[in-house]
């Protein structure tokens, strides 16, 4: 334990020490403040022109993926803006605010902060000095570090990014609900496509039919339809309960075989929706309350997806459970094209809202180097201070968490590569 003004000094200047400090801080901890590092002039203009040209090409090549990508970039920017604004408001020193990572493409400085765009579109970052006791700062700036601020201020700043995602989601949901209405999910699986000459097509199933039961077992949605079909063997006969033009009919179906030997119906299906029109106040209220079930479903999804066993099973083809399948923005972008084509702006905005909730929840899991890991450290430090009377600051020895943080990064890397492999070889 140390007093408030003198956190333990970290004198190791090696590259390994810098790497550890950046790992714990979730980004760069040093930067050259010389003016020659700023990127402007014809080089900066050329770089920005290239980015604009890339987005323009994407807009012409696939409009809905373009809309999705712009929405994601804007969400990332607002995430970091949340950190930036709350850090400034609470008196912390912010030295950098960059969109993307990697080499600088264009930047400028206003006051003590450098703003700009970098080359690799993998996120964004705000550099706040003194994120932990491993981050050395000038003695005159110690009072403006993240680590020296009160617990409520640290918690606000570190959670501001995820809070911004929730605000974005509420605004997007309000827009959809007030203009297009809210889609209520009903039981059943609506047939969207049939395999050519497949079992369901030969049995007389039609696109637009709603499958409500298989052999008397009620179907809650598309996932349950697939699960119920897979409980049978190829060549088995089942009875599909189908709702067609508001009339319930039974359709006998002889199952075929998948390449892996499992039962095949030859049906692609989606959820069944009923659109509810809302007044503006009702749309606002539902936009707020719906965040909670979305967040709960996202929490369960994160736990499933982060399980290394599930990652391995998906890569080896041992499971096709979409609720535990890792995916990347590339995969979601491919889905966004289908969503845009089938549901238009309402579907795209809803997709972006759900994505923002998921990212906001995932980012607050208590795992370094995620923001939730820093929030957990702040809470731990506050508990230790309270146990000792609350008269002196306690600075956690975050260097001891380095093996844990490396383990988290390893799992996240596995998740990314596995998701990219599946998105390319087995698109959803």
Image (spheres, rainbow, N blue to C red):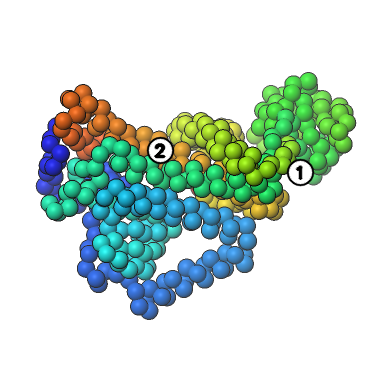
Q: Earlier in the sequence, mark 1 or mark 2?
A: 1
Q: Is residue 12 left or right of residue 27?
A: left
Q: Secondary structure at mark 2?
A: loop
Vertical placement of residue 361 versus 137, above or below: above
Residue 381's place in the image compared with 111, above or below, is above
Disc marking residue 223: none
Quadrant housing the C terminus: top right
Q: Is residue 6 visible?
A: yes
Q: In front: mark 1 or mark 2?
A: 2
Q: Is residue 293 left or right of residue 249?
A: left
Query: Whole-percent x and y of residue 65?
Result: 59, 57
Q: Quadrant of the N terminus?
A: top left
Give above or below for 162 relative to 321: below
Q: Residue at x 48, y 56 (%)?
A: 73
Foreground of the two, 124 or 18: 124
Question: Is residue 421 visible in this depiction of the protein?
Answer: no
Q: CA distance from mark 1 to mark 2?
A: 38 Å
Q: Nearer the viewer, residue 51 or 88?
A: 88
Residue depicted at x 44% and y 58%: 121
Q: Nearer the viewer, residue 146 or 305?
A: 146
- Assign a secondary structure to mark 1: strand
* Residue at which label 2 appears: 364
Q: Which residue is mark 1?
A: 193
Give residue 7's quadrant in the image. Answer: top left
């Amino acid at each position: 334990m140390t007093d408030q003004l003198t956190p333990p000094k970290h004198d190791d200047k090696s590259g390994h020490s810098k790497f550890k400090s950046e790992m714990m801080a979730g980004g760069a901890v040093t930067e050259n403040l010389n003016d020659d590092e700023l990127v402007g002039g014809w080089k900066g203009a050329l770089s920005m022109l290239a980015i604009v040209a890339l987005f323009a090409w994407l807009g012409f090549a696939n409009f809905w993926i373009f809309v999705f990508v712009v929405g994601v970039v804007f969400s990332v920017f607002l995430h970091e803006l949340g950190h930036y604004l709350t850090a400034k408001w609470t008196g912390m020193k912010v030295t950098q605010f960059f969109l993307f990572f990697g080499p600088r493409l264009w930047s400028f400085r206003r006051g003590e902060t450098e703003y700009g765009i970098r080359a690799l579109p993998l996120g964004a970052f705000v550099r706040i000095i003194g994120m932990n006791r491993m981050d050395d700062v000038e003695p005159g700036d110690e009072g403006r570090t993240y680590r020296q601020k009160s617990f409520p201020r640290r918690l606000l700043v570190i959670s501001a990014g995820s809070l911004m995602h929730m605000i974005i989601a509420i605004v997007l949901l309000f827009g959809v609900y007030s203009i297009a209405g809210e889609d209520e999910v009903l039981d059943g699986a609506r047939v969207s496509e049939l395999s050519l000459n497949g079992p369901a097509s030969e049995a007389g199933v039609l696109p637009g039919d709603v499958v409500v039961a298989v052999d008397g077992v009620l179907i809650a949605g598309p996932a349950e339809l697939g699960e119920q079909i897979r409980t049978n063997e190829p060549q088995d006969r089942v009875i599909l309960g189908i709702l067609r033009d508001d009339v319930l009919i039974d359709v006998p179906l002889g199952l075929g075989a998948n390449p892996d030997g499992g039962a095949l119906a030859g049906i692609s299906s989606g959820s069944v929706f009923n659109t509810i029109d809302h007044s503006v106040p009702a749309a606002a209220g539902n936009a707020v309350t719906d965040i909670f079930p979305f967040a709960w479903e996202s929490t369960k999804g994160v736990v499933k997806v982060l399980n290394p066993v599930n990652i391995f099973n998906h890569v080896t083809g041992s499971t096709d459970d979409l609720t535990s399948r890792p995916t990347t923005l590339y995969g979601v972008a491919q889905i966004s094209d289908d969503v845009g084509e089938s549901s238009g702006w309402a579907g795209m905005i809803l997709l972006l809202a759900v994505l923002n909730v998921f990212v906001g929840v995932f980012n607050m899991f208590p795992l370094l180097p995620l923001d939730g890991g820093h929030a957990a450290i702040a809470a731990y430090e506050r508990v230790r201070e309270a146990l000792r009377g609350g008269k002196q600051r306690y600075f956690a020895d975050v260097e001891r968490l380095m093996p844990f943080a490396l383990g988290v990064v390893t799992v996240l890397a596995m998740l990314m590569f596995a998701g990219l492999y599946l998105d390319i070889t087995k698109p959803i």
